[in-house]
């Protein structure tokens, strides 16, 4: 199995840095977040050896062009993909950054999912660390299981409870057949129950328990990144079908990157 992607993010703010890091972690990416400090960032690249570097154009002590200048001496095989964020739609600035060695220029505000998509496109990998596949090909069942496992683990669903297995199976089935979302009780629960030689009602209760445990014990920031609209009011939990549908939809979006 290939190693995880490593991303060095020069932003540890609550407004952007934390949500961005949390989203990337749900993709199975190892993220190191630092304050916006160009000098420290340049030094940390040599220690952390990231696959991707994400930074703002303007930072204290050293701006993005200065950081890129220091990275020019690196071996091209180990030099990270450099992505730069800017609030300025300035073609001259963008041109200067690209000449200095930047690989991609994001204009703020930018959707976090787009950042994740560009990371996979530029590194040639998929979520979970696998190599990028030829367009139109499908991931294997083992790869799909790994992707789902990593995501629900990040969300705080403990592996030792029964609902963990049922939830993983339900999400995989829904990724493969989206129509299950409209027939959770009638079709999805019975399909999972058949796979585990149990009953639909037990599957439903176990999945509900797994979601409740994640909401009670999971990382609030990561949950908020994925389910922000559902946990604003007293940590309200999504229904089983909402949870399964959203995770399956995110996975389908990731597979389009491959």
Image: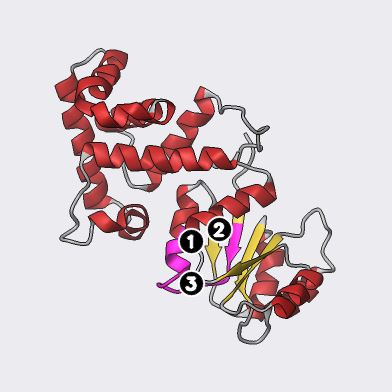
Question: Which one is nearer the viewer's eye here, 47 or 79?
Answer: 79
The reply to whether dot 2 and dot 1 touch (C-beta < 8 Å) is yes
Residue 120, image x, y percentages: 62, 48
Q: Residues within 10 Å of mark 3 (few under 14, many from 20)?
A: some
Q: Is residue 113 found inside the magenta-colored segment of the image?
A: no
Tag 2, which secondary structure? Answer: helix
Mark 3 vs mark 1, foreground winner is 1
Tag 3, which secondary structure? Answer: loop
> How far apart are the alpha carbons under marks 3 and 2?
16 Å
Please give the name of the residue rendered at 20% of the width and 42% of the height, measured from the top-left corner.
239
Residue 174, image x, y percentages: 37, 29
Q: Is residue 133 above or below residue 116?
A: above
Point out which mark residue 111 bears: 1
Quadrant of res 205: top left
Q: Which residues are magenta?
A: 7-21
Position of 240 with respect to 223 (left or right) is left
The reply to whether dot 3 and dot 2 touch (C-beta < 8 Å) is no
Position of 63 with respect to 77 (left or right) is left
Q: In this orientation, does residue 165 appear? A: no
Position of 80 with respect to 17 (left or right) is right
Please give the name of the residue rendered at 51% of the width and 65% of the height, measured from the top-left corner.
110
- Residue, disc 3: 12
Q: Residues within 10 Å of mark 2 (few under 14, many from 20)?
A: some
Q: In this orientation, does residue 122 appear? A: yes
Position of 118 with respect to 219 (left or right) is right
């Amino acid at each position: 199995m290939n190693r995880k992607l490593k991303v060095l993010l020069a932003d540890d703010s609550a407004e952007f840095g934390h949500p961005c890091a949390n989203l990337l972690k749900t993709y199975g990416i190892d993220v190191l977040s630092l304050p916006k400090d160009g000098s420290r960032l340049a030094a940390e690249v040599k220690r952390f050896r990231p696959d991707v570097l994400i930074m703002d154009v303007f930072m204290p002590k050293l701006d993005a062009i200065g950081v890129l200048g220091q990275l020019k001496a690196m071996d091209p095989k180990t030099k990270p993909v450099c992505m730069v964020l800017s609030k300025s739609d300035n073609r001259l600035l963008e041109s200067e950054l690209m000449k200095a060695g930047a690989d991609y220029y994001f204009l703020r505000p930018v959707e976090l999912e787009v950042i994740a998509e560009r990371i996979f496109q530029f590194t040639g990998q998929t979520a979970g660390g696998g190599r990028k596949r030829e367009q139109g090909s499908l991931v294997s069942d083992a790869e799909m299981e790994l992707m789902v496992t990593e995501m629900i683990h990040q969300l705080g669903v403990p592996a030792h409870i029964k609902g963990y297995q049922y939830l993983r199976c339900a999400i995989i089935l829904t990724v493969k057949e989206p129509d299950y979302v409209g027939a959770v009780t009638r079709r999805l629960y019975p399909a999972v129950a058949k796979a585990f030689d149990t009953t639909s009602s037990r599957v439903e209760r176990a999945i509900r328990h797994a979601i409740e445990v994640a909401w009670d014990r999971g990382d609030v920031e990561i949950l908020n990144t994925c389910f922000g609209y559902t946990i604003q009011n007293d940590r309200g939990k999504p229904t089983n079908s909402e949870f399964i549908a959203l995770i399956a939809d995110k996975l389908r979006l990731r597979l389009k990157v491959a």
